[in-house]
């Protein structure tokens, strides 16, 4: 088998890599590592690197995000980068979109700008760069480098290098899709402002939670929380301060309550806490402790310190409990707490 046959054979391997399950939350160096390593061996080159375009208002920047010299987990703290101002002909070649086949990188008009700053110092003689696309536009490049000796890149090698760029395209598209799906999932289940579960997720899961506790004969209680005088906070200090109060409250609640106690933003300044395996008295005591924790926190508004309180109603669920009726009952207890002086918990 000659080298060209091996390249075609390994093209199938790279195609399989493209469809493998990959952790796209990992750094690029990690989720591209095996593809780059296999490519390094197949083409028998000195180094392979992946660079992505990052356009800002001042400069066009090409940033190195993966490199076979770094090792599987060896991404540097500061990534190497190139600017269009320093290497205009190279950037223009990338924007054109055709492979950069530089048998002599020292004299090729697309790579000549690297001669003194990089090629001579690294003893690189030849480069083969293929373009990474997204939605038909170049977003980066895969750079194959040959050190010490000059190399005449043949058509099979160029084809294989383009396939690696296509693999990068697929993986970056899949990473983008994965991030989008994660964002959508967060929008479905989590409150965007506070980061706790939202009202929809409460209603999606509460019946299963009740059934589980009934089967295991475990107590289950719900605390319905509403901030005291929250409208006056918004009216006096502005909605940004009101948002800060909500975020600070959830931060304190997540620290003060148990991990098993599920917190939901029910709407506006209303929250529900589901106390798993806890009866109504213990749930009430937990909320009283949370009230004490909240009292000690001050929200700074310019030079004025602002503290806040909440009232709550607590109900224990039973096998016959209707979640609609439980919320109504908790809301009545909450109203009683407000009526009798606020900053109270009723059960």
Image (cartoon, rainbow, N blue to C red):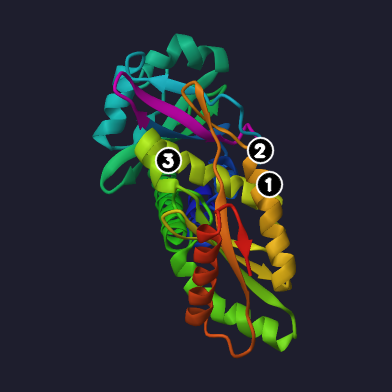
Local crowd size for mark 3, using a 10 Å CA cut-off: few (<14), some (14–19), many (≥20) = some
- The boundaries of the magenta stretch are 54-71
Q: Are marks 1 and 2 in contact (CB under 8 Å)?
A: yes
Q: Which SS class for mark 1?
A: helix
Disc 2 is placed on an element classified as loop
Q: Which residue is mark 3?
A: 233
Spot occupied by residue 271 in the image (x, y as percentages of width and height)? 52, 59
Q: Mark 3 and mark 1: span between their CA atoms?
A: 20 Å
Q: Position of residue 109 (x, y in %)?
A: 31, 19
Q: CA distance from mark 1 to mark 2?
A: 7 Å
Q: Are marks 3 and 1 in contact (CB under 8 Å)?
A: no
The reply to whether residue 260 is visible in this rendering is no
Q: Which quarter of the figure has residue 72?
A: top right
Q: Nearer the viewer, residue 143 or 344?
A: 344
The 10 Å Cα crowd at callout 1, few under 14, some 14 to 19, many 20 or more, is few
Measured as percent of width and height from the top left, residue 170 is found at 41, 53
Say which residue label 1 marks: 292
**Looking at the image, is 156 positioned above or below residue 317?**
above
Q: Looking at the rendered structure, which numbered label has been put on residue 296?
A: 2
Residue 347: image location, x then y, percent: 63, 70
Mark found first going from the N terminus, 3 or 1 = 3
Comparing 218 with 74, the one in front is: 218
* Marked residue nearer the N-terminal end (2 or 3): 3
**Quadrant where the N terminus is found in the figure:** bottom right
Q: Secondary structure at mark 3?
A: helix
């Amino acid at each position: 088998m000659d080298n060209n046959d091996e390249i075609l054979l390994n093209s199938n391997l790279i195609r399989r890599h493209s469809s493998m399950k990959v952790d796209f939350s990992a750094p690029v160096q990690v989720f591209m590592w095996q593809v780059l390593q296999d490519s390094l061996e197949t083409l028998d080159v000195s180094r392979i690197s992946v660079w992505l375009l990052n356009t800002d208002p001042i400069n066009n920047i090409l940033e190195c995000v993966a490199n076979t010299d770094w090792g599987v987990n060896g991404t540097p703290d500061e990534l190497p980068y190139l600017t269009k101002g320093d290497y205009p002909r190279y950037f223009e070649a990338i924007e054109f979109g055709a492979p950069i086949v530089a048998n002599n990188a020292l004299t090729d008009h697309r790579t000549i700008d690297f001669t003194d700053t990089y090629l001579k110092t690294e003893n690189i003689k030849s480069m083969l760069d293929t373009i990474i696309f997204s939605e038909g536009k170049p977003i980066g490049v895969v750079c194959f480098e040959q050190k010490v000796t000059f190399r005449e890149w043949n058509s099979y090698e160029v084809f294989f290098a383009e396939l690696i760029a296509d693999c990068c395209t697929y993986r970056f598209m899949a990473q983008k899709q994965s991030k989008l799906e994660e964002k959508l999932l967060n929008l479905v289940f989590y409150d965007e402002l506070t980061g706790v579960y939202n009202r929809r997720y409460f209603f999606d899961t509460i019946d299963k939670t009740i059934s589980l506790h009934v089967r295991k004969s475990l107590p289950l209680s719900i605390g319905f929380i509403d901030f005291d005088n929250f409208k006056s906070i918004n009216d006096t200090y502005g909605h940004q301060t009101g948002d800060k109060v909500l975020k600070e409250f959830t931060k304190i609640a997540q620290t003060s309550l148990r991990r098993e106690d599920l917190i939901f933003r029910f709407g506006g300044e209303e929250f529900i806490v589901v106390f798993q395996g806890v009866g109504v008295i213990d749930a009430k005591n937990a909320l009283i402790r949370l009230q004490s924790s909240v009292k000690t926190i001050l929200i700074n508004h310019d030079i004025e310190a602002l503290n806040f309180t909440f009232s709550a109603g607590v109900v224990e669920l039973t096998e016959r409990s209707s979640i609609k009726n439980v919320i109504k009952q908790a809301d009545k207890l909450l109203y009683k707490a407000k009526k009798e002086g606020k900053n109270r918990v009723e059960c």
